[in-house]
Image (cartoon, rainbow, N blue to C red):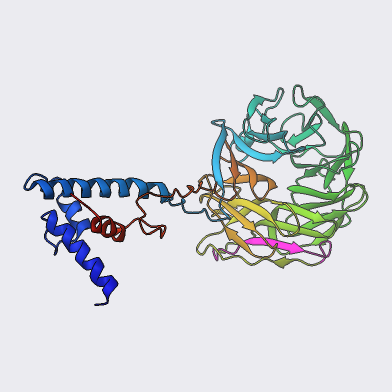
Amino acid sequence: MDWPALIYYSSFRDILRRAHIPHTTRVNSYHKEHPMTHPTTKRATGGRLAIGLLLVLGLIAGSSALVLATPAPAALNPSDLTWQEVHSSPGVYWYTVDFPTSQVGYAIGGPDWNVNSGIGTVTIAKTTDGGQTWTASAVPNTNRFMRGLDCKDVDNCWIAGASSPRIQRTTNGGATWTEAYNNADWSGWLWSTGWTGNATTVMIGTTGYANEPGRRANFLRSTNGTNFYAEIANDPREFVVYDFSCPSPGVCYAAAKQTAFFSQDDGDTWIRRAAPAQRFYGISCTHNIVCWLVGGANGSTTDGALQIYRSVDAGFNWQQVNAAPLAGNRPRFWNIDMVDSTHGYAVGCSNVPDPVLEICTGQGILYRTDDGVNWVQIPSPTNADIMDIHAASMEEVVIVDWAGKIWRGVSGPPTPTPTSTPTVSPYDVNNDGVVNIIDISLVAAHWEP
């Protein structure tokens, strides 16, 4: 044993001897197992030393607390979101959400379109604080579901659906709604609404063209926001137009079964671009030639494949993205919102019992991408069908579900835990930055009872 070790061992053994603590017992174990049995009265010198030793140990424990930082909480997965239920309207089935500005947003809901032809009153919810709080109100003169919603700005919005009248608009932020006039040879239901980005030019999606009275239109179009006329695509199909995306003013795409319709003249003419043989319900474009389509399988497969496709050539070609399948299920995506050309979210249902019936028997699903090609599932706040999403950024989103709820999700790095500023301890006898048993031995070596 070298001499520093010998001094340390001898000093420590002397402390234990004077305090009547067997030197074979570890100090930390002794304190843990016998916290109230220290011999403080046997001998005067031993008692004083033992009391002094306890004081030193107590002071060391106290001083140690000053320099030990509280462990930081485990960091969240950076792709996860922290969710808050910000609104609930029992009995309302939310369909679509739209934010014309960062602070003002609208959501449209009402009766389930699968039940009793969607008979019931339409509900509009509005937020003026970025989705943190919402106020819901009934839309007067509505008697069936309305699914289409889009806004030019905070005051001007259009809604469309199966109600009579089929199209309504507001010019005062939803305070009042008035009829917009359908001048087309169309009497069927309407499914989607899209502002082209120019003035008051608005598009409405129909159930699809058929060469028979009341069915001759793929789209209804208005340039003044009030009077709508028929638009027929170059290759008209009897496909429901479910969604619009206009990446720049006058350049628009529309999602339909096996189709991405395309217009570059403010919706005046529409060209059908063939898409994969699936049913598409949502579309989001970040550039005039870059778009994503989402939907569900058109057949009876349960291979769990996710129907998300990307085109980088204006819809001439579509490539399925990379995503792990939900084996044994038939997932369906209702909508998608891309923040930019590499980041975005898609929402829907994990399993649908039928490729045509718009009923979800699974639970809400939420996927994200950080490169536009690879998509991963992240935790959803709801078991209900998620119908639409607004992504202000990858760190702030709003979703609406089929159970009457609106959710707001936010993310970001955890709040840093403040680190305690180390305090120099007077009991750090050897000034090595740590108060430990060596300091005790050094104190004991100079202890005079």
Image location (x, y in percent) of residue 163? 72, 31
What residue lies at 68% left-to-right and 65% top-to-bottom? 373
- Look at the magenta stretch and give its main secondary structure: loop
20 relative position to 277: left or right = left
71 relative position to 304: left or right = left
143 relative position to 445: left or right = right
What residue lies at 92% left-to-right and 47% top-to-bottom? 268
Image location (x, y in percent) of residue 100? 77, 37
Image location (x, y in percent) of residue 62? 33, 45
What residue lies at 59% left-to-right and 46% top-to-bottom? 386
The number of numbered badges drawn on the structure is 0
Image location (x, y in percent) of residue 361? 51, 49
Q: Which residues are magenta?
A: 302-316
Quarter of the picture holding the N terminus: bottom left
- In magenta segment, residue 32: no
391 relative position to 172: left or right = left
Residue 208 visible to the viewer: no
The relative height of residue 373 versus residue 171 in the rendered view (above or below) is below
Quadrant of residue 228 within the rendered picture? top right
Q: Nearer the viewer, residue 449 or 337?
A: 449
Residue 251 visible to the viewer: yes
**Furthest residue to the left?**
42
Q: Nearer the viewer, residue 131 or 360?
A: 131
